[in-house]
Amino acid sequence: MDFVQNVPFFSILLSLGSGVLTSIMSKKIARMWNTFVLIAITVMSAALFVYMLDVREPFIFMMGHFPAPWGNEIRAGVLEAGMALFFCIIMLLSMKGGQKHIDEEVEEAKINLFYIMINLLLSSLLALIYTNDLFTAYVFVEINTISACGLIMITQHGRTIEAAMRYMIMSALGSGLLLMGLCILYDITGHLLMSNIKASVAYVYAQGTYNVPLIASIGMICVGLAIKSALYPFHTWLPDAYGYSTVSSAAILSSLVSKGYIFLLIKIFFRVVGFDIVVDSKIVNIFFVFGLLGMIMGSVNAILEMDIRRMVAFSSVAQIGYIYMGFGLGTTFGVIASIFHILSHAVTKSLLFIASVGLTDASNNSRDFEDLTGSGYRNPVAGIAFTIGACSMVGIPMFSGFISKLLFAQAAVQNSIFKLLPTLICLAISTVLNAIYFMKTVIRIYTPASAVRYGYLKHAVGKDVKAYPVYTLALVLLILLNMVLGCCSQPIVNWISSGLGMFG
């Protein structure tokens, strides 16, 4: 076994162990250690990604070197390695972009707790990407949930506590359905390792003996993970959770946490059940309907918002709708489009949240649209970054959002007329709605306060804000990453396609 094949296990163990070590560190040391861990795992993930591109074959890492059914397994292919690398980069940039606000908004006595939650969250995301065992996946789903809840309520004011309670209630419902689905699947197949389950499911489905409980199990798993990833109409916890937590928490939650659940769902589609069986069960049709509804209703709610952070949060409801709509098309190319949109949404949403906090800093910490008037001049870096993120969400060429919508349109054209027309119509409507609320915000932040001839600003306009170097660097790197996705999309699409091929 090549040494680089230890990277998945080392990455999970390092981040999990760091959660324990951080609890005894000082505030400064905890921050430095968290940065070191993120950089180290990013470098290791990059090495693994390069290795997987070279060998083009997945490998299995047996925990303790015990084979199934006694041992646990980690599996890595080119898609898993690339996704782990991308998640680490986004988490690192989200942490550095919001570092100033972490120090200001989190009580000094709770700084250690914040970094404990970050390390546990990273370990759970990596485990969801790499694990080849469904029960291990469920354990880390719960670790992910608890960590995310801690990040939401770390500031402990009324809105964050309420948001955390809503999040826990909805997550508990999703976790319960997921666990029941896994129990039924285990009862049918007698296995927990994904490859073993897939062979048993194929046999059972061909025999037709347990099709009803099998479909019920798949349905419970799908609905449970859809609830946890905030598919409309299970999104009610999302606006407050993203809107009132620290900016780093909001960026990580919107970019990575829900995507970890979605990536696990993709693994279940291809490595546990088999995508043909999922399509044949018609569950994808339910995803298609609710995905289209989410695309429209998330944008409508965003238009009605007068708080910039909550507006960006409601935009996530629409973007998650895009991902599930791609699943609902029932084709491999639709799933490829959804995975690309996971990448696009992750980088763009981090960019928007971090940029929006720079605009509010320049407006006396007010998030009301009226008070943001002219903030793009007072904080030029944040204004430019928010504008680029908005252009990506609308679907302007050269940015990642344009490629996402193009891929979804191509996937729809390959489908039947019954899904082609609704997809293209909702894509068009959603794009117009995206333009309404994002361009409205861009116009607002670049309207000089002195030029406002109506109403009045609730607060003083605010002073010019000099961006911190680390904050500026984080925004610049997120912008560059967005443009790489938008301008060099074909190699990325090829990588996703190759990775899905390895899933089988």
Image (tube, helix red, strand yellow):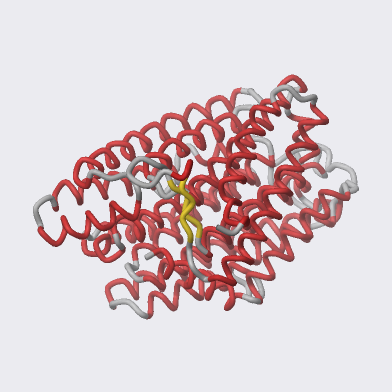
Tag count: 0
Residue 433 pos. (x, y %): 52, 62
Task: Decide if residue 451 is in sight here.
Answer: no
Is residue 287 placed above or below 497 in the rendered structure? above
Residue 477 seen in this snapshot? yes
The answer to whether 432 is drawn above or below residue 153 in the figure is below
Q: Is residue 18 left or right of residue 171?
A: right
32 sits to left or right of 309: right
Identity of the residue drawn at 49% across and 63% down = 339
- Give how far across and how far down residue 225 sits, in percent: 39, 45
Q: Nearer the viewer, residue 281 or 157?
A: 281
Residue at 42 percent of width and 54 percent of height: 294
Q: Quadrant of residue 176?
A: top left
Give the camera-side residue of 176 and 472: 176
- Tell which of 277 and 312 is nearer to you: 277
Q: Look at 66% across and 48% down and name the residue there.
A: 91
Image location of residue 219, percent across then percent down: 26, 48
Residue 460 image position (x, y, % from top left): 83, 38
Residue 110 lies left or right of residue 181; in this view the side is: right
Q: Where 299 falls versus 404 (above or below)?
A: above
